[in-house]
Image: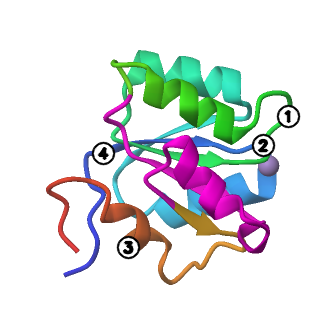
Amino acid sequence: MAASLQGTTILVVEDNPLNMKLIRALLSLHSCTLLEEKNAESGIKTAVQSLPNLILMDLHLPAMDGLAATAILKDNPVTRHIPIIAVTSRAMEGDGVLALDAGCDAYITKPINTRTFVQSIAQFLPGKTL
Ligand code: MN
């Protein structure tokens, strides 16, 4: 069965418009609600207000980075249950390990694999079929 994100709300924190556009395109066929933020501060605010089912967190953001934002969200009892998947272009430089240390549930690497992306994130949505 195909991965199903139907009915879920996904927050994407990503400052690169092309990456955001790609993620938007990949999720567009899956009947989920997409919330988009371009920096860590607004991402945290939206996470607290909207309590999405999942957060995709770019690690390299202007001002506060995605690691710090993840640590804040995982330290907040209101948001700590939300799965956070880090998106990094620097897995070879240890970013993946740093992401997990900061509290991310998983990480995926850029360039985003368009074939496996939806399945990769769907497995972190409880009750969603793969
Ligand atoms: Mn970035």
Note whether 120 is above or below 106 in the view shown: below
On the image, the x and y values in percent for residue 129 come to: 17, 68
Q: Mark 4 or mark 2: which comes first in sequence?
A: 4
Q: Nearer the viewer, mark 3 or mark 4?
A: 3
Check residue 8 in the rendering and tell me which mark sits there, or answer none. Answer: 4
Q: Residues within 10 Å of mark 2 (few under 14, many from 20)?
A: some
Magenta-drawn stretch contains 94: yes
- Most extreme residue toward the left is 127
| Ligand 1 is within 8 Å of the C-beta of the residue at disc 2 | yes
The disc at residue 62 is 1
Residue 103 percent location from the top left of the image = 49, 43
Label 3 or label 4, whichever comes before in sequence order: 4
Disc 1 + disc 2, Cβ < 8 Å: yes
Three-letter amino acid code at the position of disc 1: Pro
Question: What separation in Å lies between label 4 and label 2 (alpha carbons)?
Answer: 22 Å
Residue 119 tag number:
3
Drawn side of residue 82 relative to residue 130, left or right: right
Q: Residue at x 43, y 15 (%)?
A: 49
- The three-letter code of the residue at mark 2 reads Asp
Label 3 neighbour load within 10 Å: few <14, some 14-19, many 20+: some
Which residue occupies 78% across, 58% down? 18
